[in-house]
Image: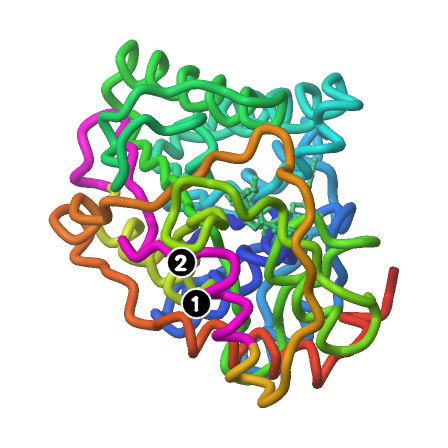
Amino acid sequence: MKILVTGGAGYIGSHTCVEAIKADHEVVVLDNFSNSSGIALDRIAEITGVRPVVVEADLLDTPVVEKLFKEHSFDAVIHFAGFKAVGESVSEPWKYFHNNLVSTLVLLDVMRANNVFNLVFSSSATVYGDPEVVPITESAPLSALNPYGRTKLWIEDMLRDIAAADSRWHFILLRYFNPAGAHESGLIGEDPNGIPNNLMPYITQVAIGKLKELTVFGDDYPTRDGTCIRDYIHVSDLAEGHISALDVIESVKGCIPINLGTGEGYTVLELVHAFERAIGKPLPHKIGPRRPGDSAATFADPSLALELLGWKAKRGIDEICNDAWNWQSKNPNGYQTR
Ligand code: NAD
Ligand code: UDP
């Protein structure tokens, strides 16, 4: 397939480009590098031997996107581009609504005008809000806890409505649980701007000495050690899930949400201990208060992904920690461009 990858220079996008090239797809990346570096593209070329076509542009720029679709005959689009910082979305909701929603509308308009009807969308387990039941199946109730989550929910709703109105569309909504780790080469990985919000990049920056210690947000949850449970999924497993989605997208009727998780939940302290095994020394950490809005336990029922995509996660928590550390220690300052 010839595929457009929006946000292809980002954390998950870059790993997906690697897997797409490995699967012999032809990849065109559109990215404005608002949260990524062009060096990721050089690294993709180093890993795969193939340099994807890269268009540095904003997905909000309709004429540029129209021109791109005239120049290339795409079979499908994987849509990663968007902002993702929960805290920032609370303080600047407009920014999130504009970038995430309007860019998706631009993309859908241009796709329709050019008869491209296959879209894989980056959704998130955040659409389950604070889940009442775990493991979470795709039929669980949906809700948003913050403006970022609301953009995912709104886009999902939009795609459901569009699919119901026009049977030419095929949408797969991939609901990611907690992406973590890095490509086994250590050449690409997560490169957050400023102090990381997410657990794994925070841990790796403590391990490298950039941050003093990890604060574990709460140890009084009703879990086995009192800390929150999440479903950490290796980013290369996640990337492979997108390729499996491309394989079946033409046969999808309408709009289908699919969880991409491992089905295994780990507590914060279990992840810390797994990481300590990877680095062979203790990781400085202390217990702090709860972070508002956190759910006690969130992990996937990944059985639909196996049934519909023939996909399941292959890599476990130790591989996630080893690969995250390999990336961070080889690239202490990430891609070093921001
Ligand atoms: P990322 O920030 O690393 O990648 C997003 C990419 O999109 C970046 O390269 C950024 O420069 C680009 N971008 C943003 N707005 C753009 C625009 N208007 N035009 C062109 N490019 C634009 O994030 P990621 O972790 O790789 O996440 C990818 C997608 O997956 C996002 O939609 C995110 O919401 C979703 N997601 C991520 C996680 C996670 O924990 N990383 C979890 C669930 C869902
Ligand atoms: N967490 C933590 N300290 C940090 C960052 C995160 O204890 O510095 C915890 C957080 O409370 C949650 C888990 O780690 O229980 C995963 O948090 P993350 O923000 O990575 O993902 P999400 O909460 O979106 O699932």
Residue 264 falls inside the magenta stretch = yes
Mark 1 secondary-structure assignment: helix
Q: Is residue 138 visible?
A: yes
Q: Which residues are magenta?
A: 250-275
Could you say where residue 3 lies in the image, as x and y percent from the top left? 44, 52
**Residue 111 against residue 10 in the figure, above or below:** above
Q: Residues within 10 Å of mark 1 (few under 14, many from 20)?
A: many
Which residue in the rendered view is the most extreme toward the left? 307
Spatial CA distance of label 2 from label 1 is: 19 Å
User: Label 1 sits on what residue type?
Assistant: Ser
Relative image position of residue 228 (x, y in whole percent): 48, 47
Image coordinates for residue 49, horizontal then vertical, percent: 54, 83
Relative to 87, residue 233 above or below: below
Q: Which residue is mark 2?
A: 266
For the residue labelled by badge 2, is the local secondary structure a helix, a strand or a loop? strand
Residue at horizontal 35%, vertical 54%? Answer: 265
Q: Amino acid at mark 2?
A: Tyr
The residue at 34%/72% (across/down) is 315
Q: Is mark 2 within 8 Å of ligand 2?
A: no
Of badges 2 and 1, the one in the foreground is: 2
